[in-house]
Image (tube, helix red, strand yellow):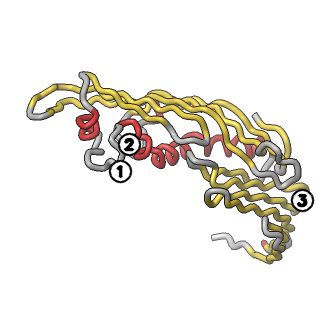
């Protein structure tokens, strides 16, 4: 659902992924279920546009994999079933846990899923390693499977020319909004978080001229003013 304006949006909803989503990106695990409650809204205390946006929510998922013939320490165990649970609160990263049936040690599970020897210095916990190893892979997969359909729907509901979120589990790295207020007159807003507390935003107004020319005037977080004349070509 969505309400507000491009300068003051409030977007929320719930997404449930179907088992047919296939394998978890970057792994051989089959994704059986995934749900996400999300909300994108101005950060608390933001009163004057352009407002910084925050992505919050809760997500959880389950994936599994069965290895047909497993040999551990020279002993044949036959089929081994691995179950992975994924859970977290946006914008924090996920907690990933993997268990095996029949039971195996953490080192044995690491070897089975191809992570043996990849533990960073000081990290011996399987769950912590999985969280670190898969965080970017999960974010990429969720971005493609979940957020792109949301963006398409929100663009249609709000009548936006553009709406996109460049997503990671740490925070939304970039949010772009664009809407034609009336014929040929486009307002765009871009917010970027580029590190710790370093933030960038740009608010622009554009007018479309004949022959695919566009005149744009914008301002950013440093108070700099920008004026551009561009032209588009079709290929």
Residue 162 falls left or right of residue 91: right
Indicate which disc, 2 or 1, sits on the residue closer to the N terminus: 1
Residue 117 falls left or right of residue 54: left
Indicate which disc, 3 or 2, sits on the residue closer to the N terminus: 2
Sort mark 2 into few (<14), some (14-19) or many (20+) by Cα contacts within 10 Å. Answer: many
Q: Position of residue 25 (x, y in %)?
A: 43, 44
Which residue is painted at 81% across and 73% down in the image? 224
What is the spatial separation of the Cα atoms under label 2 and label 1, in whole angstroms?
Answer: 8 Å
Residue 181 falls left or right of residue 121: right
Pointer 3 with pointer 2, Cβ within 8 A: no
Which disc is residue 120 wearing? 1
Sort mark 3 into few (<14), some (14-19) or many (20+) by Cα contacts within 10 Å. Answer: few
- Residue beneath disc 3: 183
Indicate which disc, 1 or 3, sits on the residue closer to the N terminus: 1
Q: In the rendered view, would you say 85 is above or below 110?
A: above
What is the spatial separation of the Cα atoms under label 1 and label 3, in whole angstroms?
Answer: 55 Å
Total count of labels: 3
Pick the front one: 104 or 113 = 104
Which quadrant would the N terminus be assigned to in this image?
top right
Which residue is painted at 34% across and 51% down in the image? 121
Which quadrant would the C terminus be assigned to in this image?
bottom right
Pointer 2 with pointer 1, Cβ within 8 A: yes
Q: In the rendered view, would you say 73 is above or below 122?
A: above
Q: Position of residue 106 (x, y in %)?
A: 28, 34
Pick the front one: 223 or 24 = 223
Is label 2 in a helix, a strand or a loop? helix
Is label 3 in a helix, a strand or a loop? loop
Q: In the rendered view, would you say 186 is above or below 70?
A: below
- Please, which residue is most extreme toward the front here? 122
- Residue beneath disc 2: 129
Quadrant assignment, res 176: bottom right
Q: Which is in the foreground here, disc 1 or disc 3?
A: 1
């Amino acid at each position: 659902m969505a309400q507000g304006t491009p300068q003051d949006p409030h977007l929320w909803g719930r997404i449930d992924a179907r088992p047919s989503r296939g394998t978890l990106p970057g792994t051989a695990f089959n994704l059986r279920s995934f749900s996400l409650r999300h909300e994108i809204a101005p950060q608390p205390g933001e009163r004057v546009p352009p407002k910084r946006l925050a992505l919050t929510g809760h997500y959880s998922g389950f994936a599994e994999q069965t290895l047909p013939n497993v040999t551990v320490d020279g002993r044949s165990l036959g089929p081994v079933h691995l179950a992975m649970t994924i859970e977290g609160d946006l914008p924090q990263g996920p907690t990933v846990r993997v268990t095996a049936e029949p039971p195996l040690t953490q080192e044995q599970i690491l070897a089975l899923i191809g992570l043996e020897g990849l533990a960073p210095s000081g990290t011996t916990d399987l769950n912590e390693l999985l969280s670190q190893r898969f965080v970017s892979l999960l974010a990429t997969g969720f971005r493609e499977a979940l957020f792109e359909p949301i963006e398409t729907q929100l663009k249609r509901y709000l009548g936006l020319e553009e709406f996109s979120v460049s997503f990671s589990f740490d925070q939304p790295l970039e949010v772009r909004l664009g809407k034609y207020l009336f014929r040929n007159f486009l307002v765009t807003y871009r917010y970027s978080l580029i590190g710790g507390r370093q933030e960038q935003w740009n608010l622009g107004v554009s007018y479309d001229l004949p022959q695919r020319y566009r005149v744009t005037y914008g301002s950013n977080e440093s108070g700099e003013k920008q004026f551009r004349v561009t032209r588009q070509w079709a290929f």
